[in-house]
Amino acid sequence: MISADRTALAQSIIDACLRMNRENLNQGTSGNISARFENGFLITPSGTPYDLLTPDGIVFMTLDGAVETGMKPSSEWRMHRDIYAEHRDAKAVVHAHPPYCTALSSLRVSIPAFHYMVAIAGGDDIRCADYATFGTADLSDEMSRALEGRKACLLANHGLICFDDTVASALALAVEVEALAHQYTVARRMGEPVLLNEIQMAEAITKFKDYRKQQS
Ligand SMILES: [Zn+2]
């Protein structure tokens, strides 16, 4: 029997998956979403179309990678697990293949401080992790490096991953990073964007931190 808490959290994951595809942040079942739960996390299963997901089909895993019998988590579970293990403040993780983030990731460029909103990910850029095959521990290691001091990064020739306090806010962060990737792509087509300097970005980062404190 699945607890009411778990059912509600699993439903919030399903809702976010459906929204992610409605908002063109992802295609098909390539993305995956998870939320920290008890001594592990709940994560979307491997290969199930989002409109067929039910709360009891959302997989529970412990941080050491143990899975409930008969359940198959997303092939990208390692990245989710490593984020929960390495970032104590991570409560939800969104991984997707949004068009502009993915396009930029194939150029292997990080998103620099072309806009103060870049600070929403925690620093003065949003890094692009080096390439490794999907689903591997190597990919997760590259992601961990790119996420140092950050809540979002691009994954080379692959897509985006980010985390936040709730499933809804992690999805909102993914939407924001995709908007930044879009804006930066357009700006680069027009010329060489002027970047904000360290002091300007430090001010933006402080303001975001203050804003979050007020919210919590
Ligand atoms: Zn992926």
Image (cartoon, rainbow, N blue to C red):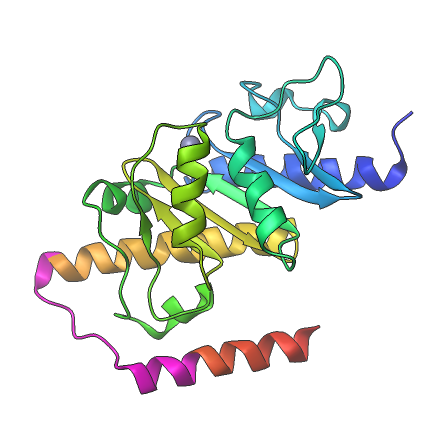
What's the magenta region? 189-204
Does 195 lie within the magenta span? yes
Question: Percent position (x, y) of residue 177?
Answer: 40, 56
Judging depth in this view, the residue of 197 and 24 nearest the camera is 197
Question: Percent position (x, y) of residue 199?
Answer: 33, 87
Left or right, 148 with reference to 86: left
Q: Is residue 188 above or below residue 201?
A: above
Quadrant (top left/top right/bottom left/bottom right) for the N terminus = top right
Does 63 lie within the magenta span? no
The residue furthest top is 70
Q: How many marks?
A: 0
Answer with the quarter of the image where residue 185 lies. bottom left
Question: Percent position (x, y) of residue 6?
Answer: 81, 37
Left or right, 91 with reference to 37: left
Answer with the quarter of the image where residue 90 lies. bottom right
Q: Could you tell me which residue is drawn at 60 percent across and 39 percent down?
A: 81
**Residue 177 at least partly seen:** yes
Q: Could you tell me which residue is drawn at 72 percent across and 24 percent down?
A: 54
**Residue 26 at least partly seen:** no
Question: Percent position (x, y) of residue 134?
Answer: 40, 28
